[in-house]
Image: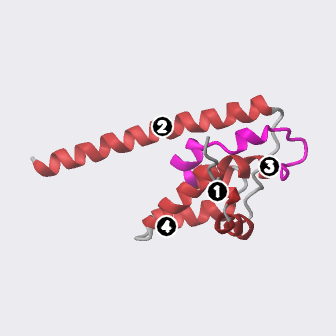
Amino acid sequence: MPQYRTASSSPFFARIETAFGFARADGAQQAPGNTIDPALLQRWNLGAFALAPFWALSHGAKLFGVISLLCWATPLWPLGVLVAVALGVYGNRLAAKNRTFASQEDFLRTQTIWARWGVGVLVLAAVFIAFQIASSNA
């Protein structure tokens, strides 16, 4: 079976993780009291991706929240997309680093709620865009 490099094993991504304060992939940088499985910290965070500014602000990643809000409110929205993707990739690590959760189940429950709201927002956005396209072609 081939060995694939993860984002954390790449020197480029390792420098980005260090520069922006992302928690380490091995789970060593968790808030006091957190005992979240490092494998969970590697997973995609749909809530952080879809609701980037709100998720970031509520999970202690204020810089990402403010940048995301400013980007979505200006013509810099492509940068907002990049911030959202970064939060999708590193969101679980940031959550474990910046917030204390009662248990691993509490962490999963919190992120699942954010993911469900994120799916709802994405579906509403897709419906809105579809109506806009349909009305402009009519």
Residue type for callout 2? Val
Of the image marks 3 and 4, the number of the one nearer the N terminus: 3
Which comes before the other along the chain, label 2 or label 4?
A: 4
Q: Residue at x 72, y 44 (%)?
A: 41
Task: Give residue 132's position: percent from left, percent from top.
Answer: 23, 48
Q: Which residue is mark 3?
A: 26
Q: CA distance from mark 2 to mark 4?
A: 21 Å
Q: Which residue is mark 2?
A: 119
- State the image coordinates of residue 71 (x, y, percent, origin top left): 49, 66
Q: Position of residue 107 (x, y in %)?
A: 74, 36
**How far is mark 3 from mark 1, CA to CA?**
12 Å
Disc 4 residue type (three-letter): Leu
Magenta residue span:
26-52
Camera-side mark, 3 or 2:
3
Residue type of the residue flagged with mark 3: Asp
Q: Secondary structure at mark 3?
A: loop
Asked if the stretch drawn in magenta spans residue 127, the answer is no
Q: Residues within 10 Å of mark 3 (few under 14, many from 20)?
A: some
Q: Is there a contact, CB below 8 Å, between mark 1 and mark 4?
A: no
Instruction: Kindly indicate whether the residue at mark 2 contacts the one at mark 1 (C-beta within 8 angstroms).
Output: no
**In 3D space, how far apart are the residues under numbered discs 1 and 4 (Cα atoms)?**
20 Å
Q: Which residue is mark 4?
A: 79
Q: Residue at x 51, y 40 (%)?
A: 118
Give whichever of discs 3 and 2 has the lower sequence position.
Answer: 3
The single residue placed furthest to the right in the displayed view is 32
Measure the alpha-carbon separation of dots 3 and 4. 28 Å
Image quarter in which the N terminus is found: top right
Name the mark on residue 7: 1
In this view, the mark in front (1 or 2): 1
Local SS, label 4: helix
Q: Quadrant of residue 128?
A: top left
Callouts 3 and 4 close, C-beta under 8 Å: no
